[in-house]
Image: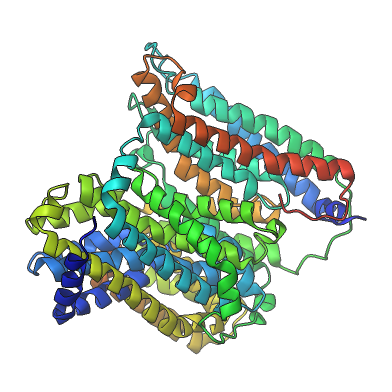
Amino acid sequence: MTDTAMEQAVSPGERAGTLAFLGLVAAVAVAAIVLTRGFPPNTLPTDVGPARFPVLYALVLIALCAVSAVQTLRAPGYEGLPPVPGARLRVALAVAAVAAAIALMPWLGFLATAALFLFAMIWLMGRRQLVGNAVYAAAASAAIFLLFSYGLNVPLPGSALLGAG
Amino acid sequence: MFDFSMLAQGVATLAASPMALLMAVIGVAIGIFIGAMPGLTATMGVAILLPFTFGMDPLPGLLLISGVFFGGVYGGSVTAILLKIPGTPAAAATAMDGYALTEKGQASLALGTATVSSFLGGTGSVLVLIFLAPVLARFALNFSAPESFALAVFGLSIISSISGSSPVKGLIAGMLGLLVATIGLDPMGGFPRFTFGFPDLYEVPFIPVMIGLFAAAEAFKTMEDPARRLGRAAKLGRMVPPWDKLRSVLPTIGRSTGLGVLMGMIPGAGADVAAFVSYNEAKRFSRNPENFGKGELSGVAACESGANACTGGALLTMLTLGIPGDAVTAIMLGALTLQGLQPGPLLFQQHADLVFTLFAGMVFCYVAMLVLGLGLMRIMGNVLKVPPALLTPTILVLCMVGTYALNNSMFDVGVMLVAGVAGYFMQKYGFPASPVVLALIMGPMAEANFRRALSLSNGSLDFLWTRPITVALLALALLTLFLPVLRWLWQMRQGGGGARRSA
């Protein structure tokens, strides 16, 4: 296989994932075109209106997704490396942890949320030192809080439940 | 004829003002720190420190602000190179080759080159500011909506050359970025587009998207296999780049400095535009364009010198014409006014002594940046020695805090998370993130200026071919856009041909 062909080779998982991603992007582009139908019509002869650019971008995007899908389907295949055990679950849990932190921060405040988040994430990364992890989580959260709140004058979210940061 | 005696007098005045020198050093140090933090920009740093200058004399106050400005532009490169987390939008371009060098175990070379390039680019731009200010300011005045539109199109055309091994995937990323860039208020009529009733989306959430695409996505990728990253080389050797390496990038630095000054002078085009344009030109002029994106030192030098040269360009139009080129210089305009100085042509006549002392101080700021940069890099580089199990979660917290700090908005943090997930999958399936950032910068500029130009020409498109600068920029854009695509198609037809061009 030539260098370029090797660069283009995809594993079955990559092929399915790329096609799913392209499908999602194309769906976003179609949705954008549909949404622009609710935009006000252009009445000025010296303007193109608010919908012209998004529609143009979306159409080009759909065309490019089609080209890329054909390329992906035609690309030579290879077996690919075996996935790292638990990789998907770890990433999914990390995303969920960030989402949970965003949801909890207005209620618990930055300090408590960040400390809990850090502790959970360090554990998820495979470091099993309860005390050490807890000390790092608390110290890092406090350092970031002090730096932003007092050093940079950026107020971080306080706690709606506890009434403090 | 340039009056050298004024400059000499300015240097003497500066040397006799220890407070001003101290403020310059403090400003640069704060700027480097703020620039290195994802989400915190030079604009924010200047805004935070502005109130502290109210009680100061004009010179120390203005040098403190200038130091933060210069340090802030440079500081973004540190985390971009070490962690692939660009502290500033301009550093997104630096991350492409800088991080690749770190992965090769050449972090100190990348950091050293970035520091020296920033110093040379920035100092060069201040020298241009000193000697050529009036001439160049007149040129910058020729830029109106059609030229700005053409410049944005030229900027967008760079997508094809930063797309890695698949131009189509790069173009998809760019187009997706352009579509995202239309979120917010319509630039002409003010109609809210794709905002779904959220006032937070009235402006394109550019910084949250950038932090998510680069920093959060990289952190999520690390979560896949924490053990693999534990063994990454973290050695930092000599920080000053060897002379042979430096000599090889000097032409790139010179070219990028010129481009950076020009970009800085044009309102709306800032350090981020300059970094990407300089990167593109460095690749075009390179004998090894296939190395770009894989750890090419010229790529780092181009981005950093271009971005830092922007500072002199932006100050040039602000000081000579009273027109701020970006948000930072707009705040600096306010700082000058507060000090009783009115930027414009008369500034050089009525306050020539202060202006030339300020110029000398700006050069001193860059010298301070060089010394601090090379001195502190070794300490900053220790971040690589922190175990990923501690570093990755901390990065995610900094992503959240940095994004929140922009507008005190948890909504922005949510946008960052969505962008992080999107960036993770983009990285996984070979879609580059840099074109999205470029499109987010250039998209609004292109649309707003196209529609403004159309309105100014009463609906006629003749501004596209009747204005020389516009025509030149559009021709350059076509050349930039289609050459890599044609080269790629040629390779496809040849079945690889042994050549492995990245685009």
A76 vs B104, left or right, is: right
The image shows residue B106 at horizontal and vertical percentages of 62, 78
Vertical side of B385 occupied by B274: above or below: above
* Tag count: 0
Task: Name the image quarter holding the C terminus of chain A.
Answer: bottom left
The image shows residue B90 at horizontal and vertical percentages of 46, 57
> Which quadrant would residue B371 be assigned to in this image?
bottom left
In the displayed orientation, state which residue is furthest to the right: A1
**Residue A98 in view (yes/no):** no
**Residue drawn at (82%, 66%), measured in percent from left and top?**
A82
Task: Name the image quarter holding the N terminus of chain A.
Answer: bottom right
Q: Nearer the viewer, residue B407 or A61?
A: A61
Question: What color scheme is it?
Answer: rainbow
**Residue drawn at (21%, 52%), measured in percent from left and top?**
B319
B59 vs B428, left or right, is: left
Vertical side of B439 occupied by B132: above or below: below
**Residue drawn at (57%, 47%), measured in percent from left and top?**
B435
The image shows residue B421 at horizontal and vertical percentages of 57, 53
Q: Nearer the viewer, residue B219 or A123?
A: B219
> Which quadrant would residue B118 be assigned to in this image?
bottom left
Q: Nearer the viewer, residue B173 or A117?
A: B173
The image shows residue B337 at horizontal and vertical percentages of 11, 53
**Residue B384 in view (yes/no):** yes
Vertical side of B81 occupied by B140: above or below: above
Q: Nearer the viewer, residue A164 or A54?
A: A54
